[in-house]
Amino acid sequence: MALLTVHGLGKKFGGITALNNIDFTIDEGEIMGIIGPNGSGKTTLINCITGFIRASAGKIVFEGRDIRGLAPHRIVNLGICRTFQIMRPYASLPAYKNLIIPLYSPRARKTGGWRGGGRHGDRNIIALDLLEEVGFERESKVPYKLAGTLPTGYLKRLELARCLALNPRLLICDEVFSGLSMSEIASMVPLIEKLNRSGVTIIMIEHRLKELFRVAKRVMAISYGDKIVEGTPEEVMANEKVKEAYLGA
Amino acid sequence: MKTGKRRERIDRGIKVRSDGLYALSSWREIAYLLAPRTLLIGGFLLAPLLLLLFPYWQKVLLIVCIYALLAMAFDFLANYVGLVCLGGSFFVGVGGYGAALLNKYCGLAPFLSIPLAALLGAAFCTLLLLPCLPLRGVYFAIITLMYPLMATRIIEAFELFGGTNGMMDVAGFANPWIEQYFLVTATLLLLFGLRRLAVEDLGLVIKGIKDNDQSVRASGINITFIKAQAIFYAAFLGCFAGAYLAHVYMWAGLSMFALDFSIIPIAATVVGGGGSLMGAVLGAVLLVPLSEALRAFGPLRIVVYSLILTVVIVIKGEGLLNYLARKYSQFERWVEI
């Protein structure tokens, strides 16, 4: 069943066409990859879907409802959560307090039950649980350190934990592997797989193709705002247009 | 160049011990924790009694409390929400006129009209500031600076509420003790209430907006709504101060929109140290009596006042309270590198 259908999505910044007539569908429980060279419009696509940028044309249908033009916080409360490519932690708060903020949102309160930190839950404890889930060592000092002092690996995990706190239906990861060491990536991949098994549909934007192809069964490639091809990783990599986009003609 | 030495700051043992549960195991640790709070609360509660023989300074104490409230509002907006608000006098004016109207036309006694004027006034201010909430930094500051100016001109031009004469015959307090203690206790309650709010979950969300508003939006929270709530709390403090002033002066007029109510609280926050609310109060406690004491200088008063401010800001830019708090909890020593 289609969870998200994007139909004819377009975005123009003045005279520049950042996205042109993008169509794709993602089914419930799927992991889909989006690849493309720098500046091809991947992040713009995410920003349009999550409402951070208003799309100029097209339809974005989530669970049968057109969500184009909704404010970002409304879209999040429907269950579409995103991570940021450049991590956006709350630097002056300790890592676990960073999660109080998503846990405070209407979605976490509604869907989380006591785990959402509602009337009977303690948000601090839930936050520590979530951090443990994404790989913060619970018995160490790390969850209590100021987020501004954490290294990239932890910040990426913190971004992921922020999304988990919101009980997402659709999780959009904007380059979660970038800037991580090989061993850090190796520990992130099972995390993504585990999330997917628990029923979360995932869209991943990624430059680390090898790791992406391990988890994503279907990949879409875009270049200069146009969708070039969609298919299994092998099909996409074999495609001439993709090679041309990455390597030049 | 000096080499080989470096200054090191280390938490005092007593600070570390009193951070944990051990604090409850000895009187010394308990005293360490309670001393600053007791000094503040006791000082404020005893001040009206101590100043019994100096009625003039009793009035100054009231002004201290008024500016402390305004400085708290400024500090809260600037250092917790990230909105630099130069419209403190707008809050005062709205609160003052509100209390005067409630008192004269609805016949409410000061005890009802002050809280009610603070509530309604805060709602009114929040509503008016709603369109400016997406603005940040200097743009928000400029717009909020405009509001009191606009209000003055509108009242003047349309002769509203007595025009330039203001509204006379607002009921005063029955007795000076009530007058004093009403404001002093209210100031303390609002101070500790706001500090509590800042560490509650809502307070964390507010801090999150200052750190990173896009991330708060991506967390499914309507930041305009949260900012509006924060403005409401700050405006409540300002309107409360204004409403109280109207009942003390038994008058509400255009001078309630005066720039003093916007600027002096900022000076108090800077001198006292922002980011803790206590610093704002400390700043008001120091600056207002200082400005009174300088009256002896006559016309040069402002010059001396400005000089003192400049020196304090240049030498201790972090703010007095932050400096004192550091000395209280840490010691320094020189170590070999």
Image (cartoon, rainbow, N blue to C red):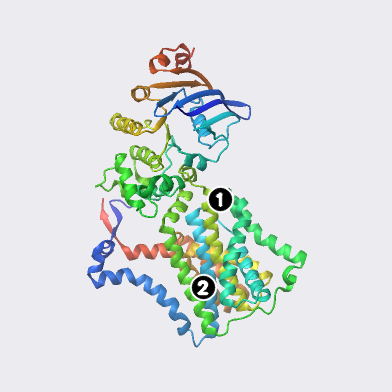
**Residue type indicated by callout 1:** Gly
Residue B326: image quadrant is bottom left
Q: Which of A233 and B10 is in front in this view?
A: A233
What is the number of the mark on residue B50? none
Give the Cα separation between the discs numbered 1 and 2.
28 Å
Q: Nearer the viewer, residue A233 or B292?
A: A233
**Callout 1: helix, strand or loop?**
helix
Question: Which tag, 1 or 2, sits closer to the chain's start?
Answer: 2
Give the mark count. Answer: 2
> Label 2 is found on which chain of the structure?
B
Percent position of residue B191, x then y: 46, 67
Q: Can residue B303 be seen in this view?
A: no
Q: Is residue A40 visible?
A: yes
Residue drawn at (27%, 64%), measured in percent from left and top? Answer: B18
Disc 2 marks which residue?
B65
Disc 1 marks which residue?
B137
